[in-house]
Amino acid sequence: MTTSRAGRTVILIAVALLTGAVPAPAQTPTPLVPVGEPITQAGLRVALGYLPTAVSLDSGGRLPDGALALHLQLDVDAARGNPYGLDSDDSVPYLRLPFTLTQDGTGRRLDGTLEPMVSRDGFHYGANVVVAGPGTYSLAVEIRPPEGLARHTDARTGVLPWWAPFTLTWSFRYPP
């Protein structure tokens, strides 16, 4: 049985309320700022949000001291009825997601790749990025098919080929 991300959140909240479990002050999560509504395309539901500060990652990737930074967080989940054999609401694994972040009106541009990671919010693709300061930013992300994830292709158990790469773009204000 699989439980959607929303279902897991409800269960965790219920358990916390019933047990009186409250995170210690150092464990208070930074609120995720949603950017727009989730976009459904090619059998996927893609949602963007960001944390207004960078997060610590075990992979390192230290930012310069005093740098103004945020943490991009992208959820790529299977939509209901997708042709890839993925359960609805499951995170799609094995993606490499190149992105371009630009600050509107300045020409400042940052290219990178959203990497797979996990947090208390669950599995997502993310990156810490240094920003120049307050303003409006545009983020373009190329949603490529999984790399290294084999799919059945026989008549009995096979699924359709992966989607063709496509790009999604969002605009957001920082700070919120």
Image (cartoon, rainbow, N blue to C red):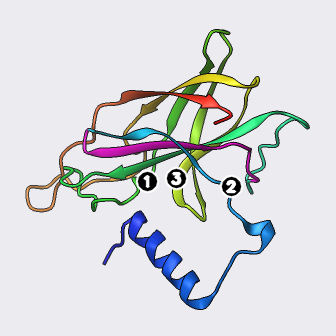
The amino acid type found where label 1 is placed reads Pro
Q: Residue at x 76, y 23 (%)?
A: 132
Query: Residue 124: which disc?
Result: 3
Residue range highlighted in magenta: 42-56
| N-terminal-most mark, 3 or 1 | 1
Q: Nearer the viewer, mark 3 or mark 1?
A: 3
The single residue placed furthest to the right in the displayed view is 65
Q: Secondary structure at mark 1?
A: loop
Query: Residue 79: which disc?
Result: none
The answer for how far apart the CA atoms under marks 3 and 1 are is: 9 Å
- Regarding residue 101, the answer to whether it shows in the image is no
The answer for how far apart the CA atoms under marks 3 and 2 are is: 16 Å
Q: Position of residue 39 (x, y in %)?
A: 34, 39
Query: Residue 30: which disc?
Result: 2
The image shows a total of numbered marks equal to 3
| N-terminal-most mark, 3 or 2 | 2
Query: Residue 93: which disc?
Result: 1
Q: Position of residue 37 (x, y in %)?
A: 39, 40
